[in-house]
Image (cartoon, rainbow, N blue to C red):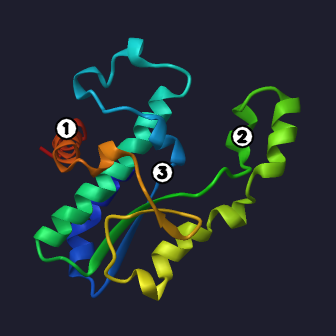
Amino acid sequence: GPFLLTELLLPLLKKATEARIVIVSSDLHNRSGPLDLSKIDDESEFGRFAPYNRSKLANVMHARDLARRLHDSGARHVTVNSLHPGVVATELSRHMGPKALRSLTSVFMKSEKDGAHTSLYLAMASEIKGMSGGYYSDCARVKENKVARDDEECKKLYEYSKKAVGLE
């Protein structure tokens, strides 16, 4: 997944003059409580949206921890930020309840093109150069889940993730 790919590309990104890592998350990460890594695979912890919300929180936590690690290692030319693209009308939305409800909510959804704006902004905007560890929505920095601001929790998730994907 994105964690493994990012970690495997880090040596190349660190050699670049400038590099940007953009991690797509979701505002639903705010509906997740703290991650209990001892129960991460426990199916009794699964609800309809809980696994998705936790995975998006993990994305934001990975971005924040990676930004810290890059800064601490002197690789300040590599920026990493996470984002909420908005509620985008994609094929995934066909799983969001009854068809009548989807028709009503589709009025409030972004097009795929509009949903890409924040990703492109973080990847290319000159004002983002050197800014790392943020969480963005609609091309503006916004506050992330308080769990993602806990450096110790982010470090624990990083160590767990390394083991889970075989990097340690």
| Front position in the image: 99 or 29 | 29
Residue under the point 17% across and 47% down: 155
Which residue corresponds to mark 1?
A: 160
Amino acid type of the residue tagged 2 in the rendering? Ser
Residue 100: x %, y % from top left: 88, 31
Residue under the point 52% across and 69% down: 140
Which residue corresponds to mark 3?
A: 25
Mark 3 is surrounded, within 10 Å at the Cα level, by few (under 14), some (14 to 19) or many (20 or more) other residues, namely many
Q: Looking at the image, is mark 2 or mark 1 earlier in the sequence?
A: 2
| Front position in the image: 91 or 123 | 123
Of tags 3 and 1, the one toward the viewer is 3
Q: Identify the element where label 3 is drawn.
A: loop
Residue under the point 50% across and 19% down: 47
Please tell me in which quadrant of the rendered image residue 105 appears. Answer: top right
Residue 93, disc: 2
Please tell me in which quadrant of the rendered image residue 80 appears. Answer: bottom left
Amino acid type of the residue tagged 3 in the rendering? Ser
Residue 64: x %, y % from top left: 29, 58
Numbered disc total:
3
